[in-house]
Image: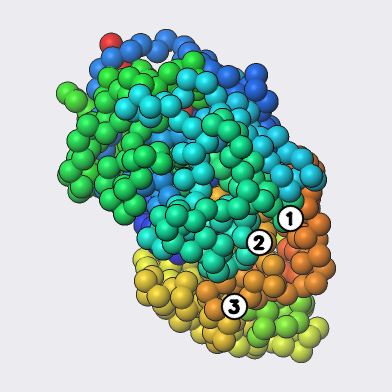
Amino acid sequence: MTRMTDISGMSRTRSTVLALAVGSLVLTGTTAGTSATAATAQAALTDPTQITFADAAGSAGPAQPIPGASSGGTLNMLQQDTFGHLDPAQISVNNQAQLATLLDRGLTGYKLDNSGAYSVVGDLATDSGRMSDGGKTWSYTLKDGIKWEDGTPITSADIRQSVERLFAPFVTSGPTYLQQWLADSNGTDYRNLLPGGPYTGSHLPDSVLATPDAKTIVFHFKKARPDLPYALALAGYSAVPQAKDTKEAYDLAPVASGPYKIQEFKPGVSMTLVRNTEWDPATDSSRHQYPDRFQISFNVSSVDSTRRIMSDAGADRTATSFTNSVDAGSIAQIMADPQMAQRTLAGYQPYVAQVNFNTKLITDRRLRLALAYAIPTQAVFDAQGGTYGAELAGSFISPTLPGYRKSDPLGKVAHPQGEPDKARRILKSEHKLGMKIRYAYIDSPAGRQYSAAIETALDKAGFDVQRFPIPGQHYYDTIGMTDNTYDMYGSAWGSDWPSGLTVIPPVFDGRTIANGSSDYSMLNDPRVNRRIDRIEAMTNPQKAATAWMKLSDFIAKNDVPAVPTVYYKQLQMFGSHVGGATYQKFFSNIDATRLYVKP
């Protein structure tokens, strides 16, 4: 899903466009758990349990009341960035996805109960989906009582419109999984399935998408798609009303189906959300409608939002942020003050940073292993800000994903300073002492800091390293070229939903190698490709999750195409009169749907 230009750079979702820095605009992923202050962060950052696909009972509303919650008041949301898109089909970055949890609903969604357990539930649908034909067919039935903000019922015609408009040429952002699956395509030619979308009078055939009555939707795929409930929970697949679909103009004036609607939007300045009186809590198992309004202010940097929330004065007592993280320069002061520390949330983000080895240039696995031993991952950890910004990584699978278990096949957690003597012994046995390495890194303060430490460690191990800085705006374009001339370079990747399907195949499937591909190591191991195919066909999510983790270890140990360095983490803060503050692991930020204003 998401690329991240090292620890201080840009990120991009697998299916979409460039976003900004860590703690600003990045999509999905995060921590395990319910309300947890950073003071108890390490206890909260536990291994996630397997996510379940809920049946009708688990999808029925209303949501569990938040203990101590009260209705009324205004929450003040301090945001660095304005919302670039409001049309669900165009949503790709997580500030937009956070807003969508308040405005939009889709067939499925994520539910976090008061015990801290997560599940994929039916949102507009009665359940998370009914699979048949070995995972090739999925059926959904819409709930009773679901309405648009104007009071009109939400029907299967709206869901058909929402799916078919994804093929229109004006939809250039947002996820493409569903479109590609329906078209049985791995590229942009999925649009050929319905050129122009539904606006020319054409529709997807019933053999692809059927709506036999006002409440039934049936998806037909040519291959098993066991992750469909996860995919449909993406904000980008939320519903749009057929009667109010204004094509491009919908991006400025969406129609709400969630608990809030837009009263006023001044792009780059502010947005006001008020209650959607047509939203029925009896139909919604995951959302609440406690505040009277959300008052959102834009152009508030992390430095400014941190300062204001630390002061906890006036309106800032009811302030927090969808996505702004705590300013790194203020972390020590905040965590040294028990009163302020109690007003923080900590959690994982979905990203795993790694140093990639160009397997087209370094074809000898043992030489890649020597590099892996020599690299000091502590340098990346330190550059990210330490404990509250990162955790040493041993796997390509993030702790945010089901199936994750602590693993360290390359010994990078056990030996974060590297093992130069072990690396040197390999070089000596291979007669490669003095081997030249061209190391590309992002030209940023953090990139310069950790790349210098890595160069020193590799030189000590017996390599001859030459570093090459690359500007951030060109970084992924450069390392994504199949003929790039660099031996090693950093990257980071995160999941679109809690499944290794959105991590291992895009990063290590050799059949995807092309200019712009995210297989930066250009690994093409038939053994890995075959295992990917087998796991993708698994219809049991628990077994698939375990298999992705095993495959991650296999790749690290047997191919050594890259070294995992850190798992990213996030720290946020809220005012003393903000209640219900909970870190939502699938948005890697605070859960806006659980917030309330304390009296």
Q: Nearer the viewer, residue 164 or 480?
A: 164
Lateral position of residue 458 relative to residue 269, left or right = right
- Label 1 near label 2: C-beta < 8 Å? yes
Helix, strand, or loop for circle 2?
loop
Q: Position of residue 500 (x, y in %)?
A: 67, 51
Lateral position of residue 91 relative to residue 190, left or right = left
334 in relation to 222, above or below:
above
Which of the 4 quarters of the picture holds residue 352?
bottom right
431 in relation to 98, above or below:
below
Neighbours of disc 1 within 10 Å: few (<14), some (14-19), many (20+): some
Nearer-N-terminus badge (2/1):
2
Q: Which residue does the image show at 31% across and 48% down from the upper left?
A: 246
Which of the 4 quarters of the picture holds residue 121?
top right
Neighbours of disc 3 within 10 Å: few (<14), some (14-19), many (20+): some
115 in relation to 423, above or below:
above
Q: Position of residue 85 (x, y in %)?
A: 33, 50
Q: Which residue does the image show at 72% across and 56% down from the upper left?
A: 222
Lateral position of residue 473 relative to residue 432, left or right = left
Q: Which residue is mark 1?
A: 223
- Quarter that holds the N terminus: bottom right
Q: Which residue does the image show at 61% across and 30% down from the upper left?
A: 141
- Quarter that holds the C terminus: top left
Q: Position of residue 175 (x, y in %)?
A: 50, 54
Helix, strand, or loop for circle 3?
loop
Q: Amino acid at mark 2?
A: Asp
Q: How far is disc 3 from disc 2 in space, using C-alphas?
A: 19 Å
Q: Position of residue 177 (x, y in %)?
A: 57, 55
